[in-house]
Image (tube, rainbow, N blue to C red):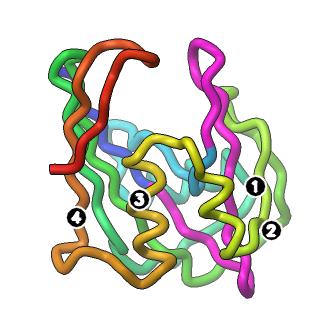
Amino acid sequence: MRSWAVAGGVIANADRILMVHNHRRGGRTDWSTPGGVIDDGETVLEGLSREVEEETGLIVRDWTGPLYTVWAEAVDMNWTLRVEVHLANSYLGELNIDDPDGIVREARWVQREAIDELLDGQQLWLREPLMGYLNGDLPETGEYRYRILGSGDSEFRVERI
């Protein structure tokens, strides 16, 4: 089974949150906070800082967290995912996308009250934890666990466990 360690960063500027527009295989797109897969030999925060700089041009060296953790298991697709999401305490720089993976095509500061609408229709494991954090409604453990059933973009079903 393939396992991914991923980190995400909540970066706030007054009442706005930085969101990135991701273009996935098969033409799918989604919005998320910046972040990505942690490379071998990197700590979560080293990988998160690298991903944020690649995807947004911003430099973040001081993080708080994790704010929450997401676990997802897709047995039928043979993968598991663990995501740690941290809060940026400060940042330097201006928005400038230089994503070597070519996934992030846009970075945008989004008003907090508009994020729910932006995430409408996104995968449950992306939408629910971020909205829980923004609404001050995280589970006591800070963990979200999901099971993905099925094996295709249009065929799978996600349930919280």
Q: Could you tell me which secondary element the residue under label 3 belongs to?
A: helix
Q: How crowded is the residue under tag 2: few (<14 C-alpha within 10 Å), some, or many (20+)?
A: few
Q: How crowded is the residue under tag 1: few (<14 C-alpha within 10 Å), some, or many (20+)?
A: some
Q: How crowded is the residue under tag 4: few (<14 C-alpha within 10 Å), some, or many (20+)?
A: some
Residue pointed to by mark 2 = 93
Magenta span of residues:
8-30
Q: Residue at x 63, y 82 (%)?
A: 90
Q: Which image quadrant is residue 61 in?
A: bottom right
Please state the total of marks drawn on the protein image. 4
Decide: marks 4, 2 in contact (CB < 8 A)?
no
Decide: marks 1, 2 in contact (CB < 8 A)?
yes
Q: Nearer the viewer, mark 4 or mark 1?
A: 4
152 lies above or below 119: above
Q: Could you tell which of marks 3 and 2 lies nearer the N-terminus?
A: 2
Q: Which mark is residue 128?
A: 3
- Residue 71: image location, x then y, percent: 23, 48
Q: Could you tell me which secondary element the residue under label 2 belongs to?
A: loop
Q: Residue at x 83, y 58 (%)?
A: 95
Position of 155 with respect to 30 (left or right) is left
Closer to us: 46 or 90: 90
User: How far apart are the two marked residues, 4 and 2, measured between alpha carbons?
Assistant: 31 Å
Q: Residue at x 67, y 46 (%)?
A: 54
- Residue 81: image location, x then y, percent: 27, 39
